[in-house]
Amino acid sequence: MMEAMDSTELGDCPPSAKLVFKVLEYDGPLTQKQIVQESMLSARTVRYALERLEEIGMVDEDIYFADARQSLYRLEEPVAADGGLDDASAADDACCAE
């Protein structure tokens, strides 16, 4: 699913950005504080890694409704060439909706 994006765009990123990507991939949407706890990186390093991932369009920042002072970070959904969602992620969503 994310391997194609992972290998091409993530290759130029620093190791901290790759680790943050993997943390978000495994643990789902997280706040910056939660990413710091999971990755054991400093807050400054996580902030920089998230900026890099946002620049290349791999991470999306949303409002964290439990505490509006924080943001919730999640991986961008892969987009197919026709502009729709990738078939693999659409199939995952379909089987989980039941």
Image (cartoon, rainbow, N blue to C red):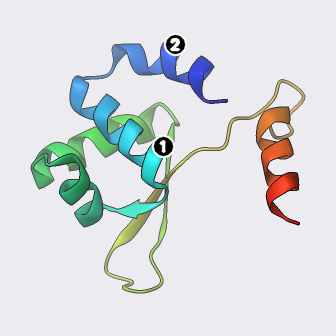
Residue 9 numbered tag:
none
Q: Nearer the viewer, residue 55 or 25?
A: 25
Label 2, label 1: how many angstroms apart (C-alpha)?
16 Å
Residue 86 visible, this angle: no
Where residue 45 appears, as percent x and y from the top left, is 15, 43
Q: Which of 6 and 38 is in front in this view?
A: 38
Amino acid of disc 1? Glu
Q: Which residue is drawn at 48% across and 43% down?
A: 25
Residue 76 drawn above or below residue 6: below
Q: Nearer the viewer, residue 87 or 8?
A: 87
Q: Using residue 85 as the reference point, say whether residue 40 is left or right of it.
A: left
Q: Which residue is drawn at 43% across and 54% down?
A: 27
Q: On the image, which quarter does residue 67 sit in?
A: bottom left
Decide: few, some or many residues near mark 2? Use Cα within 10 Å; few <14, some 14-19, many ≥20: few
Q: How many labels does the image show?
A: 2
Q: Nearer the viewer, mark 2 or mark 1?
A: 1
Q: Residue at x 32, y 43 (%)?
A: 51
Residue 81 visible, this angle: yes
Decide: few, some or many residues near mark 1? Use Cα within 10 Å; few <14, some 14-19, many ≥20: few
The C terminus, quarter of image:
bottom right
| Residue annotated with mark 1 | 25
Residue 39 drawn above or below residue 11: below
Regarding mark 1 in the picture, which secondary structure is present there? Answer: helix
Amino acid of disc 2? Thr
Regarding mark 2 in the picture, which secondary structure is present there? Answer: helix
Q: Using residue 49 as the reference point, say whether residue 59 is left or right of it.
A: right
Where residue 55 appears, as percent x and y from the top left, is 43, 35
| First in sequence: mark 2 vs mark 1 | 2
Q: On the image, which quarter does residue 50 sit in?
A: top left
| Residue annotated with mark 2 | 8
